[in-house]
Image (tube, rainbow, N blue to C red):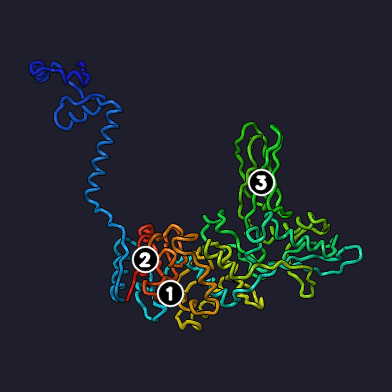
Amino acid sequence: MKYLQLPPRVYARFTPLAAGALAILLGLGAIELRASPSAEPPSVRGRGAVEFQARRQTAAQRRAAQRRAAQRRAAQRRRRTPPPPPPPKATSPRSAAALKADLMSIMTSRTRSGIWSSSVISLSRGDTLFQANADIPVLPASTMKLLTAAIALERLGPNYRFSTDVLRDGEVDANGTLNGNIYIRGDGDPSFSKRFHPGKYSEPVDKLARAVAAAGIRRITGAVIGDATAFDNVLYPEGWLDRYKGSSYAARVSALSLAENVLWVTVAPGKSGSAARVTLEPATTTIAIRGGVRTVGGSGAAVRANYLPDGNIQVRGGIGARSPVRRFGLVVNNPPAFTTGAFHAALHAAGVTVEGGAKLGRTPGSATKVTSLLSPPLEQIVAIMNRESINLFAELLLRNAVRGPGRDGQGSAPAAESLLRGFFQEKMGTNASTLAVADGSGLSTLDRVTGFQMAELLGYAHTAPWGPAFHASLPVAGKSELLRTRMRQTPADGNLHAKTGTTNNVLALAGYVTSENGEVVAFSFIYNGADRWNARASIDAMGETIARFVR
């Protein structure tokens, strides 16, 4: 028996007569058709016809059809999804009841998920104007710095100065030789950087080294020893995520810190074909540069700098001969060793020979002070911390608050949590059992503060002796730093003073605003959730509403 397989197009062209003839032959058994995996079914009606036509489409036609189908599905989704609510608008409440209702409406009308913990109190009359989940602990983000600022000012005072000291444990002979070691003792000074000591990144240690040389010391038979024992040795606070580690906002924390614990790899081109010049700023003897960068043609650069397992830095790539000097920032992994090495290098630059290298240790109680470098007053440091939201400053200040003005004990985050809980209980009469303090900056995912606790802190700070310094440290709506572009040309512009807080899942604002008839109001709005852009719009509308409030 012969098997006949016909291509699909043959069937499509059969006339009714040919189809009838074929049916007769099949019925007589003269021809037998066998199904084939590659053959189309004889029928081109119904679903088979659709499949048949689809296979004849070109690739461009298929893509066009897919786009049209996607557009139809998107249109259907839009019809099913309700339009977003309009942006919240500030109101002008004329009573406390109206203010409460308006703030609640603004808070709940825009954000579609997440949770708020908020509190608003009148400092002029002493009554609570608004609360929403005020006793629920939430992540505060950078509004945590308000707690750090308050406890540092309370414990140390606005005029307190940090002191980075240089000491020796031996005698200096007539030839200028120090028979012993020289120590650099860290005091957790946030200002030990170019920000407060203009010049090179190494300017703070350069000043100390020049003072050592001016004291008549020309040679040191021992070592340069860095003392970071004022704080515990936890460089990376608990609750800081691993993905933060390469970012300058998550610089390591140490009592012996320099240049805000960020160093710069500087690459300067040479002649084409030669090695480029690679240096570190600040220079340090405890970190070496490995690898190399070649000078190539052009004006571009492709350079990679990274840490090696031994703590040194590998730099590789190429830089164009016509390229400007390139700088690459790296977070310092070991601030005490880095700073000690930088002081060692500064001594060498100042003409002081050190025979014993650089290492870490504790300063003996019997050591003699050679020189010191003082910080600006604490109130200036707090102002920069709050206005620019510098996390490292907050971590150093929190640990120094634990030590107090007598520099007693050792600064640590666990001790700071105990200190702050006692501060709330004793000074404000506020239950702080739910307060969780894992760091001073608010970067930790373990921090927890309630809206009520934050508002109570603001109320206490308002009348504290250090209150003016606290107030002056806060950004101003429409005018300065992180609030420069917010609430502009509204009654809150130039009036509202507050600290912002922002992470991927937190949007917060806490501070002070004066109402239309002169009533001073403290507020804390903390939102935790994914809809933080709408939360920001709501917070700005609420701040403006309080500024319009009259009763």
Q: CA distance from mark 1 to mark 3?
A: 46 Å
When asked about the image quadrant of residue 39, the answer is top left
Where residue 198 appears, as percent x and y from the top left, is 67, 57
Residue 288, position as x, y percentages in the image: 71, 50
> Which structural element holds mark 3?
strand
Kindly report the distance in space between the C-alpha atoms of the residues bearing marks 3 and 2.
Answer: 47 Å
Left or right? Give the position of 213 relative to 82. right
Point out which mark residue 455 bears: 1
Res 413 visible: yes
Residue 34 placement, left or right of 275: left
At a point 59% along the width and 74% down the height, the residue shown is 158
Question: Along the horizontal axis of the image, is 411 left or right of 71?
Answer: right
Quarter of the image where the N terminus is located: top left
Q: Kindly identify which numbered label has been placed on residue 4.
A: none
* Along the line of sight, the residue nearer the viewer: 418 or 382: 382
Does residue 19 sit above or below 165 in this rendering? above
